[in-house]
Image (cartoon, helix red, strand yellow):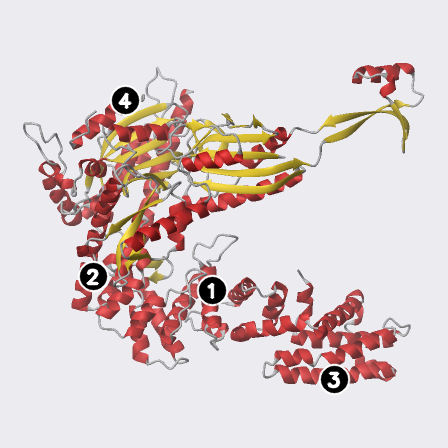
Amino acid sequence: MSDFIFELLSEEIPAKMQAPAMHQLETLILKKVNENGLVVENLTPFVTPMRLGIILQNISTEVTESIKEIRGPRLGAPESAIDGFLKKNKIERSDLQEKKTNKGDFYFYTIKINAHSLSNILAGIFTDVIYEFNWPKSMFWGDNYSLRWVRPLRGIVAVLFENETRERVPLNVRNIESGIVTRAHQVMHPGFFDFNSVNDYQEKILKGKVILHPEDRKTRVLQEGKRQAEAKGFYLVEDDKLLEEIIGLTEFPSPILGKIPRELLSLPEEVIITSMREHQKFISLRSSANGRVEGFLVIADIETHDQQKKILSGNMRVLNSRLKDAIFFYQNDLELVKRQGMRAWNEKLKDVRFHEKLGSQYNRVERIVKMAVVLSKKFEIEQDVVNEAATLVKADLVSNLVGEFPSLQGVMGAHYAKIAGCKEMVSEAIRDHYLPVGSNDGVPKYPLSIVLALSDKVDYLTCLWRIGIRPTGNKDPFALRRTSLGIIRIILENKLDIDLDYLIDLTEVNFDKTDLQQFLKERIAFYLAEKNYQKNIVRAVVKQYDLDHLSILPRIIAEITEFISSEAGTKALAVYKRVSNLLNSNKEFLSFDKKNSEELATHEDQLVQEQLTLTKAQVEESLQPKNFKTALLVLEPMLDTVNRFLDNVQVNCEDIELRSLRYALLNEIRQTMDRVLVFSELEKK
Amino acid sequence: MQNPDCFQQIILLLQNFWSDKGCIVLQPYDLEVGAGTFHPATTLKSLGPDHWSAAYVQPCRRPSDGRYGDSPNRLQHYYQFQVVMKPSPITFKEMYLESLSVLGINPMVHDIRFVEDDWESPTLGAWGLGWEVWCDGMEISQFTYFQQVGGHDCKPVTGEITYGLERLAMFILGCESVMDLPYNSPTSPRPLKYSDIFLEAEKQYSEWNFSVANTEVIFRHFDDAEQMCQEILGTVVSENKSSSRKNKLVQPAYDQCIKASHLFNVLDARGIISTAQRQVYIGRVRTMAKLCADAYIDEVSSRL
């Protein structure tokens, strides 16, 4: 059994690319390991800002040797030909074997080729992996253009431990020769070192102040951070995204606790948190006594001899100047809001372009107001309130503070609205109308927030759609997919009885919305499939039911899923398939009018016809009040009848007229089933 | 070695350091630029196959950052220290860290971090990958591997380091406000602060940029610069009979591009260019930069 350690040492890998790179490395290697007949018991990938690597443990090779046969002259060929063959291969006459082939009898020489050594196989695999690796953004450096990498690649570590021996696995990429030494933390543990086993490597690298695995760095930040916070009467503000970034910026994350100077605490909390997070990657700390954000953790990548005092004071100075700037902006905003109200900002929105073909943000607000007023009638909200909230919805975009911190849009609007004396629900609606942004965000819950959120998103989507903007492939620069998903989620998660068709018709401009409807259907299917509903059922249902049934789709899908897995469902699928197979193989009969030959019908045909007529009526009756479950259940008696019919009669009978009649019957049966559910979609994978 | 005690000593230390690393020490370019990158020693020299290493101080103008000298860290006129090495040396990053030690920033007690920051200059049609360098949470430098300039691939790749001199000095000398920076040594016979030299200028230029400059004239100057740039590049110099080469006057043309870029910045600071127009102006400067880059490449390849 052998172990292998592989590291790519580079200059700092961008934080957000690290985790995906680690997974890509693992996937690529798993694939290549299999392709090359290796068995690896344990595969441990890791990544830090300075290195990307993997440890393979207990490697064994399946293939030890291979055999190659070389064909020589025909049996009975002249001696000179045979001698020539012997000479060429440097072999004796006794090495030859006789063998029959379909081209005749030949002399053969069989050579055994030793399989490549494990070291060679690994060298091949990992060289390929480096060249096949795909970074989202990569570059050249220096004057060698044989490899693009995320940042300059500085070293390759490739060490194989096999039967107590240590071996360098030879790789050479872009003139970088692989080696058996690595390095740990750049500052705290400079210099290169070697190691004698996987354990030795792991111990030395940790002693050298590098925590290889991102999850372990996360644990350290949280544990060490909590310990310090609790000792000083604080607790951590959770922020997974920030934490992900922090562990992508450090090999040995070392939290340092600091307190925010009192005079800076006059700022709204969101501003403090945002400034600390975006500019300095601080984790915010709340006081256990009053719940307010009054402290922070700097996560340094070093432990120093001065207990990190210099690092903390440097960071404090930056924080001070940032927050003082923010206070200056905040006070400017407050002054304006108190003096003139938020509407003063709306005038300024006239100068802010939304899109060159779609006018200013001011124009957009006007459209949102109109739409919100109409939409609000479904929610019994006072006109004045809707009007006020919708008018102020984008005002904060031109405030000083949002100019400085764009991510605070909405949040500052809500804050200023409260100061301007607006009702609580208006303030909340201004804050929440951007929701949901990410897939983990909740959707707005209160009627006014819902109205604003839907109006904003529908206006955004329809306007951009109208001027021809579409998402293509993985490019969606205007986030139309996210916007549509937002609309769908708001309706579904609030169980609103609102038709999507109605919503997109609220926009004042007229244009052909067919492809927009299609796009929305795809988004619905995407959303529901994400929710772990079966993809084929989602597709079948979305195909069948128009955009006006959005709010009951999850229920329908759940019912159908249940039905499909029941005995009746299995039967329905089988019958549908049986009928479809017949119909598909004889399409010429489909246009036949069965009235012409009804007198030919046998007893069996009549039985089916009767059952069909009955089932059809029952299906329509159940579908009227959207009772899909019943519609599915009433199919059952027909299924048995159809099965019996197909068992007992010959559909492809001699009499053409009768045959046509039977096909017409089958076609009607399929149509009846399709009324409830497009069964054919269920068969697609 | 003693730590620097003033702004000018930081510059001297950097010049000596990079001179020892093989850079020629150039002087600032004599036009108003928004960043040290505009110096022909960076933009033009990063094109073509020739090796090149240079370091220089470049005064930069960013009219919209003017605060009448009131802000502790924003100025409309400030200094960058620029280093370019082509091809980028393998140990470029280590050299940079060494330069910080020379300035008295001991990596054992400070937290130095390279945070992803890909550089893109829409006006120069240029981009590169690299980082901003943080020291205890303060951004003190930009570090970039050039990939394209003027739409041309950079081969070899130029490595560029830009030190923000005032920020760096504030950090090293422990000043809360840029105006408090000692410009020369506090122990010299006549110690001067940054404010003694630049405060009045900041006030005057802020006033000029934000309220006084005649924008009609500036708009016209922009058009003139663009016209001249195109005219220069449209003309082939072939008068000199002793020369068999027919080259365009790239450098004079590029001067016009730099001028146009600065004039645009003044107009932008004034807030009289709408968002829609803004893209158009940036596009016009980019076109000029691209034409200059094309002509430069032609010139370089004709020499080969």
Residue A312 locus on image (x, y percent): 25, 44
Q: Quick one: A373 or A72, which is closer to the camera?
A: A72
Report crowding for label 1: few under 14, some 14 to 19, many 20 or more residues within 10 A (C-alpha). many
Asked if badges 1 and 4 are on one and the same chain, I answer no
What is the chain identity of the residue bearing mark 4? B
In primary-sequence order, the first of circles 2 and 1 is 2
B115 up-or-down from B93: above or below: below
Asked if badges 3 and 1 are on one and the same chain, I answer yes
Residue for badge 2: A333
Q: Secondary structure at mark 2?
A: helix
Residue for badge 1: A484
Residue at image coords 60%, 67%? A538
Q: Secondary structure at mark 3?
A: helix
Task: Give the residue type that dot 1 points to.
Answer: Ser
Q: Is residue A350 visible?
A: no
Question: Circles 2 and 1: CB distance less than 8 Å?
Answer: no
User: Which one is closest to the eye, mark 2 or mark 1?
Assistant: 2
